Image (cartoon, rainbow, N blue to C red):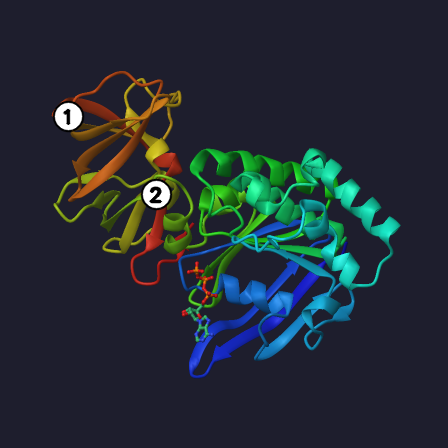
Amino acid sequence: MADLTLKALDKQYGAFHAVKGIDLVVEDGEFVALVGPSGCGKSTTLRMIAGLEDISGGDICIGTRVVNDLPPRSRNISMVFQSYALYPHMTVGENMGFSLKIAGKDQATIKAAVDKAATILEIEQLLDRRPAQLSGGQRQRVAMGRAIVRDPDVFLFDEPLSNLDAKLRGQMRTEIKRLHARLAATIIYVTHDQVEAMTLADRIVIMRDGNIEQVGTPDQVFNRPASQFVAGFIGSPPMNMVEARVTGQSLKFPDDTTIPLPSAFAYLADGRKVIFGLRPDDIYPDGHGIDTSAGRDVTVLDLMVNLSEPLGNETLLFAGFGGAEWTSRMLNPREVRRGTQLSFRLDLAKAHLFDAETGDTLR
Ligand code: ATP
């Protein structure tokens, strides 16, 4: 395995600037997820690393090798796609060993590599089947087996689970995580699913319009987002965000209601326009959230529940306040009907404030 470095990596499609000179170091054995909205440049970045797309500027280094001009097969990278692209007329074993056969390896070497990968993925019993005789999850495992067999320096995954149903996706996610632990592989994983990124990755790279908006551990991007964009992208359901104006030691919302200014932001100048952000976990009906010890930065509001979504282990409540609709996550739920008036606690110590013009996080 090896580390991977992108230096001012750039891609232009004619006049369109798809990737704008990004810098990133992926450490040896690290699992990095690239996330961001559709069109932000994730797949283009991955395809440039793989050598499937020419670069317009910058450098791609694997270990100490600059691979900019190497063809894909010489980069020692394996890529797993969302469409598994297995050869239908070959058995699973032949599919997995094909790249080694092309590379001119002998039968015994190929068999040993295929058997080893099959053991890791627990698909030994499938080696003589053809792709048509496999389930979606099994096909995905074979596609991963094919990547493992090549013993690459770096694995690239391009939305590998997006063709699977929700339950299988969850199972395969766990398998990929286990696989990473066993192989100690360097992995770059593109997904638009932030839950997948949060659960799998050591670090998450959030892209926006061809730039990197933030790089951080799941904990950092969730709890210390660099911008309103990251805060809105990471977390499900998304963070509540409402425009507000600092008025003395209060925040005034568009409908003229106010809450206390969170004490961490007491320094903000009167009149400053901000975006107030609070995760659904940090606004909850009295007695249904985290214990709030005395002296904590909390405010209580009586709100009417507009809608209630029971999910079993939790219930999402929607309530209007400050000219917006807020989502609240109620753990250990009890039944709440719409139209009920409830006392909600806002944990202001967890509030995020963003500059209303730039979207930058205020600290
Ligand atoms: P998605 O999640 O939808 O796959 P993405 O973040 O992977 O999105 P890319 O596929 O990297 O996005 O595309 C980045 C931008 O580059 C998009 O605006 C896309 O339309 C554009 N683009 C991609 N390939 C080409 C091409 N061959 N010619 C011109 N523009 C392209």
Instruction: Please say whether residue 137 is visible from this viewpoint.
Output: yes
Left-right relation of 221 to 320: right
Q: Looking at the image, do the residues carrying marks 1 and 2 touch, with CB atoms under 8 Å apart?
A: no
Circle 2: element type: loop
Residue that badge 1 annotates: 338
- Label 1 within 8 A of ligand 1 by Cβ: no
Amino acid type, mark 1: Arg
Residue found 19% across the figure and 23% down from its top = 342
Left-right relation of 21 to 341: right
Q: Check the picture and name the quadrant holding the N terminus.
A: bottom right
Image mark count: 2
Residue 238's label in the rendered image is: 2
Alpha carbons under labels 1 and 2: distance apart: 21 Å
Residue 362's label in the rendered image is: none
Q: Is residue 216 above or below residue 52?
A: above
Residue found 55% across the figure and 45% down from its top = 132
Classify 10 Å Cα crowding around label 2: few (below 14), some (14-19), many (20 and above).
some
> Residue lying furthest bottom in this view?
14
Classify 10 Å Cα crowding around label 1: few (below 14), some (14-19), many (20 and above).
some
Residue found 83% across the figure and 63% down from its top = 104
Amino acid type, mark 2: Pro
Left-right relation of 326 to 236: left
Where is residue 193 drawn, in percent x and y? 45, 47
Left-right relation of 334 to 58: left
Circle 1: element type: loop
Where is residue 232 drawn, in percent x and y? 36, 49
Where is residue 149 drawn, in percent x and y? 75, 50
> Quadrant location of residue 313?
top left
Instruction: Please say whether residue 29 is visible from this viewpoint.
Output: no
Question: Camera-side residue: 338 or 189?
Answer: 189
Residue found 43% across the figure and 37% down from its top = 166
